[in-house]
Image (cartoon, rainbow, N blue to C red):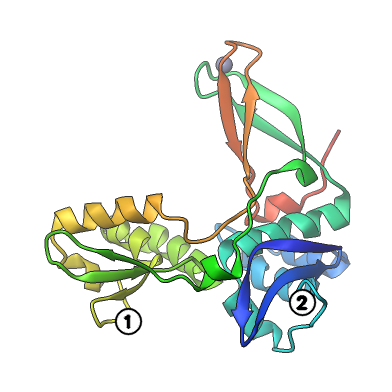
Amino acid sequence: MLFRLPNGFIDGLYHFSMCEVGELKGKHQNYLANRELVEGNIGHLPKILSDLIIRVETDTGVEWKGSKEELLEKLVVGDLEAILIKIREASFGVKYYFDANCEECGKTHKGLRINLDTLEYKTMTPEQLMQTKVVQLPKSGLEVELRPQYLKDLFEVINITKNKQDSLITSSVVTSVRRIGDKTKLTSEDFDDLPASDLIFLMTEVGNTTLEEHIDTLVTSTCKGCGKDFEYKIPTILPSFFYPSEA
Ligand SMILES: [Zn+2]
């Protein structure tokens, strides 16, 4: 299945924006069932992605020639999620069934359905991808360059939420910052000494800046109990996303 990535990446003169994926095989079901690999984690992702991404190319068919390891470092999370959705489509079709609770009245809705190929998404142009996103912190005056998130950041965020509750606030920003002043290679300690007002400003900027595009996986349904709308986030990065739909 060949499709357009929400972002893609620039390498040399080319914008690699198209991706072809294959379908899940028996051995992938084994990765997904491997409790040690997936429990509370996303260890299945590198294996499934590197096995099932067949190739990436430009929209005129120039194929990217690097290794799979390199490719998984280049693709932003929005693209990885799109790839996971297309792998699911190629494997089980477009129908995706889910259960969700209405936040308003607590009613459980079973067997709700969305067609994965109808989820909306925007794409980034090469010009937008090459644009540097820079903000200046109001208190310290430091210049901060923002960046999109990558596969390693997903692992980092999960690692942080499990082990370092006390640095949770700074850590969620760490994975969206490429540079503070002259300093790159940042850890959460680099954020610990920032004035609180700068940190809050930075979190707001990260939230308001389009650092990458993605397929919109937030599904809105209307509750049959109370009539209000409620939302459900399709868990694309979890193993359960690849269990075949019932109904
Ligand atoms: Zn309700």
Q: Is residue 91 left or right of residue 77?
A: right
**Location of residue 244 with respect to 155 vertically, above or below:** above
Looking at the rendered structure, which numbered label has been put on residue 57? 2
Q: Is residue 240 left or right of residue 191?
A: right
**Looking at the image, can residue 127 be seen?**
yes
The residue that appears at 79% across and 82% down in the rendered structure is 62
| Residue 107 screen position, x and y as percent | 60, 18
Quarter placement of the N terminus:
bottom right
| Residue 119 screen position, x and y as percent | 71, 43
Amino acid carrying label 2: it is: Glu
| Residue 109 screen position, x and y as percent | 68, 23
Query: Between 216 and 13, which is closer to the camera in this rendering?
Result: 13
Disc 1: which residue: 184
Q: Badge 1 local density, few (<14 within 10 Å), some, or many (20+)?
A: few
Amino acid carrying label 1: it is: Thr
Query: Between 212 and 53, which is closer to the camera in this rendering?
Result: 212
**Looking at the image, can residue 29 be seen?**
no
